Amino acid sequence: MADAKDSFMLDAKSPKPSLPPSTPQSLSHYQHFLMAHEILRILAFLLSAASIAVMVTNSQTVTIFSFQFEAHYYYSSSLKFFVAANAIVCGFSLLTLIIGLLLLRRPGSLQRPYSFFSLILHDIVMTVLIISACAAATAVGYVGQYGESHVGWLAICDRVPKFCKRNMVSLFLSYLTFFAYLGLTILMAYKLMSSPPKS
């Protein structure tokens, strides 16, 4: 009984296992990860901001049979949703860039997987939001370009070609934002899976 008690006391006083030290190789990989993470987040911010700027400044006025018609994004609920979604993505991209710099560059961040988990949740939401906005704007652009004879919707891009071309530029920039966030989601998921577990 004395031996069992002594061994119990020794076990109780033994130090807890510490986290494995970071090797220079793992630190180098982590630096490359941080660089890719920051570049993709900056790209998402810049591309979404450029997409908004192109869309909101896009308008064209034409005269048809002595009547003036103005094409503007504000007249379409889908394009308004497109601009709003890009604005949300733009704002949160900048916010998470700052938060990511504060969280991921702190000492010991390799041993805190919850930092990666919270960011990957954000990136998934932003990815879904931006692709839904792109899909809505693409549908409007398709109808504007080709019309829809079954429901009597006429194509308008032959009358306002400048407006449609600039819309396509804005849509292209927004799709690039989607691919930047898709890359971020994959990158953060990979880092979350490869992070050392907490002991």
Image: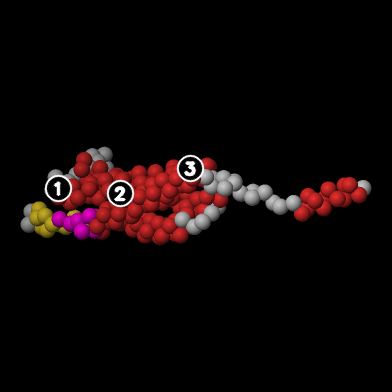
Residue 172 visible here: yes
**Secondary structure found at label 1:** helix
Asked if labels 3 and 1 touch by Cβ distance under 8 angstroms, the answer is no
In the displayed orientation, state which residue is furthest to the right: 1
Would you say residue 58 sits in the magenta stretch?
Answer: yes
User: Mark 3, mark 2: which one is toward the viewer?
Assistant: 3
Task: Name the residue that disc number 3 marks.
Answer: 25
Q: Earlier in the sequence, mark 3 or mark 2?
A: 3
Q: Amino acid at mark 1?
A: Pro
- Residue at 23% x, 46% y is 168
- Residue at 20% x, 43% y is 145
Residue 162 on image: x %, y %: 15, 50
Task: Name the residue that disc number 2 marks.
Answer: 174
Q: Amino acid at mark 3?
A: Gln
Task: Name the residue that disc number 1 marks.
Answer: 161
Q: CA distance from mark 1 to mark 2?
A: 20 Å
The front one of 118 and 172 is 118
In the displayed orientation, state which residue is furthest to the front: 24
Colouring used for the render: secondary structure
Q: Earlier in the sequence, mark 1 or mark 3?
A: 3
Q: Amino acid at mark 2?
A: Ser
In the image, residue 153 above or below residue 46:
above
Residue 128 on image: x %, y %: 41, 48
Asked if labels 2 and 1 touch by Cβ distance under 8 angstroms, the answer is no
Residue 17 on image: x %, y %: 67, 49
